[in-house]
Image: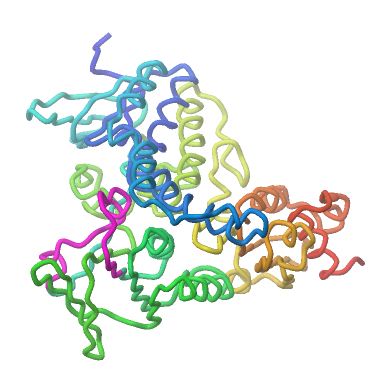
Amino acid sequence: MNPMSYDVIVIGAGPVGENVADRVVRGGLTAAIVERELVGGECSYWACMPTKALLRSAAALRAVRNLPGASQAVTGDLDPAAVLRRRDDFASHWKDDGQAAWLASAGITLHRGHGRITADRVVEVTGADETVTTLTARHAVVVATGTAALLPDLPGLREAAPWTSREAAAAATVPARLAIIGGGVVAGEMATAFSGLGSAVTVLARDGILPAAEPFAGERVTAALREAGVSVRLGAEVTAVRRDGGAVRLTLTDGEVVEADEVLVAIGRVPNTADLGLETVGRTPGDWLEVDETLRVRGVDWLYAAGDVNRRVLLTHQGKYQARAVGDVIVARAGGAEVEDGPWGKHAATADERAVPQVVFTEPEVASVGLTAAAAERAGLTVRVVDYDLGAVAGAKLHADGYQGHARMVVDEQRRVIVGVTFVGPDVAELLHAATVAIVGEVPIDRLWHAVPAYPTVSEVWLRLLEAYGRP
């Protein structure tokens, strides 16, 4: 056998690519994975893990300070240097030896370098020394290259050396003043993190804070950021950026100038497809890859795209979910087995459209799954919205003095099933999976009455939501 020929070639060794390769190997095929940076990808080194490490220490300190009896034990402030050291550990000090070793143990061949499609089922890998290796795939090529931060075309922005999510996650020091352009998840989390670490943070949120979430979520996070000393400028739009010596000056549409030591741009993502050879398969370099329900690129029977690069859902856990479906369907097609691509089928990524869970690790946390009330109405559903004060639940009162939170349940009245849930409050992330199971399982409201929450826990909010909905 030609050692440069494999059943499947995966371009991109982040969590999505790793899971695709692992799945096809477990299914009896051979797999090679191509990576130009670090095995483990964005999530391991510049996103999920290091950013949550930046956030956790301040969140724990806030929790203790809100609990009488424990708060008296707190005698000092947060140690930013210790937080950064812990973050470094979670990012494996930006070394991928452990993850590369896992690939080898799983029977996956790693090719380091830049992968580019040059013909049907052919990928050329250019190494750091410019050596080119040609790989051929017998069954499939999978693009799992993810996304990069979008930098808008603002005068002076690139010359000002702005931070993106990468620089923020890997910052060696805490800037005295940090300006953030944007109001989405990255902006909200990094405003929370760096404020907790001691930065004077200004958020310039043209479209508001967490605009895609339920409105009450953004309102509560905005209020909490302001209470923490963050300057949140709703509706503010930047027209120009200039770095003058060490300071960055951002000019707003009304002529006001905001000064900071660093500026973080967090307004969106673009696909990492600019130099993948997409023109070979009739696609435009730099475009998102449109896929069918089994994540196969439309019109190309051997090419798949999984994770952020297909724009379905830009979340690591959802990308890994897609990866499992992709790996399994490639194995099925290679062996001539039946493809189960109907809704909720083994080879379909149905949850991408109906049950996407997400936690925003701001203060307070925002945990949601499924549709917002507005999205459900846009989808043409007959909607009933049920709200409940999370702070009124007995378990929440025990959790912390002055616990404040909110829960919303969105019900499709025709089917009498839940299609969306949002929780806002301290540590609500752990409430989310029950909501996800209810939505994926399409559990009827009448049956949910028999799912009795333990007392006294915050999960009792489920009973309160059902009581507010009313029993027939």
Front-most of residues 136 and 30: 30
Front-most of residues 442 and 225: 225
Residue at coordinates 30% horizontally, 29% vertically from top-left? Answer: 96
Image quadrant for the N terminus? top left
Front-most of residues 292 and 320: 320
Image quadrant for the C terminus? bottom right
- Please provide the residue range marked out in magenta: 156-179
The number of callouts visible is: 0
Residue at coordinates 72% horizontally, 72% vertically from top-left? Answer: 387
Q: Position of residue 173 (x, y in %)?
A: 26, 53
Residue 142 visible (yes or no): no
Residue at coordinates 9% horizontally, 72% vertically from top-left? Answer: 244
Residue at coordinates 39% horizontally, 31% vertically from top-left? Answer: 18
Residue 413 in the image: above or below residue 312: below
Seen as rendered, the residue at the extreme bottom is 254
Q: Is residue 169 magenta?
A: yes
Q: Position of residue 328 (x, y in %)?
A: 51, 30
Q: Is residue 195 magenta?
A: no
Quarter of image, res 461: bottom right
Residue 2 in the image: above or below residue 65: above
Quarter of image, res 242: bottom left
Residue 397 visible (yes or no): yes
Seen as rendered, the residue at the extreme right is 472
Q: Position of residue 415 (x, y in %)?
A: 77, 62
Task: Name the colouring of the figure.
Answer: rainbow
Residue 267 in the image: above or below residue 47: below
The reply, left or right, for residue 192 in relation to residue 430 is left
